[in-house]
Amino acid sequence: MVTSKADIIAQLRRDLLPLQGFKPVSGTNENVGLGQINYSFLNASFPVGAMHEFISSDKNDNTEITLSDSKGQILFKSTVMVVNGINNYHLSNLNLAPGIYYFQISNDNFVSKNIKHIIQ
C-alpha cells in the first residue's frame, strides 16, 4: 500500500497532538471562518465550546492563568508550564452563562492586560 507524504503528515499530526496535551473539547465544532488555520487544531476543527488563548514565550516558565467575570470574581485560576515557542491553552466545560469574562496571563516577568471574552 502506497501512502502519500500528505497522508503520513496528517496521521503524524493526529498522533502527536494528544501527546502534546491537546484533547478534543466537548462542544460544537463548526466552521468559524478561519480557513487554513483550522488545520492547526486537532481534527482540523476549531472547537467553539471553549475559550482559547495562544501564549508566546521565549523561555520555559510557570505561568498563572486567571479567568474572572465582569464583577472581578475569579472563576478559574491555574498555574501551567509554558515552553519556549507558542503554547495553546484552552478552558472548557466551565458552563459559563452569557456575559463578559476576562482572561489574564501572568508570571514573574509579565502581566497581560485583561483579555476580554464575550459569551453569547
Image (cartoon, rainbow, N blue to C red):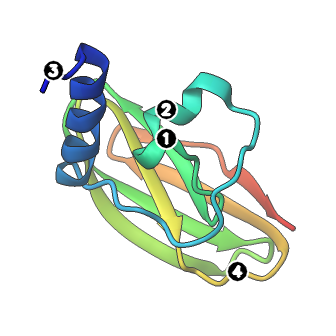
Residue type for callout 2:
Tyr
Horizontal arrangement in the rendering, residue 118 relative to residue 80 (left or right): right
Name the residue rendered at 52%, 71% in the picture. 92
Residue type for callout 1:
Ala
Q: Earlier in the sequence, mark 3 or mark 4?
A: 3
The quarter of the picture where the C terminus appears is bottom right
Name the residue rendered at 28%, 26% in the picture. 7
Horizontal arrangement in the rendering, residue 117 relative to residue 88 (left or right): right
- Kindly identify which numbered label has been placed on residue 33: none
Q: Mark yes or no: residue 111 visible.
A: no
On the image, the x and y values in percent for residue 60 come to 19, 37
Q: Nearer the viewer, residue 81 or 34?
A: 34
- Dot 3, crowdedness within 10 Å: few (<14), some or many (≥20)? few
Q: Mark yes or no: residue 114 visible.
A: yes
Q: Secondary structure at mark 3?
A: loop
Location of residue 79 (image quadrant): bottom left
On the image, the x and y values in percent for residue 2 come to 15, 20
- Kindly identify which numbered label has been placed on residue 96: 4
Give the residue at mark 2. 39
Give the residue at mark 1. 44
Q: Are marks 1 and 2 in contact (CB under 8 Å)?
A: yes
Name the residue rendered at 53%, 46% in the picture. 53
Name the residue rendered at 19%, 22% in the picture. 3
Give the residue at mark 3. 2
Report the Cα–Cα distance between label 1 and label 4. Answer: 25 Å
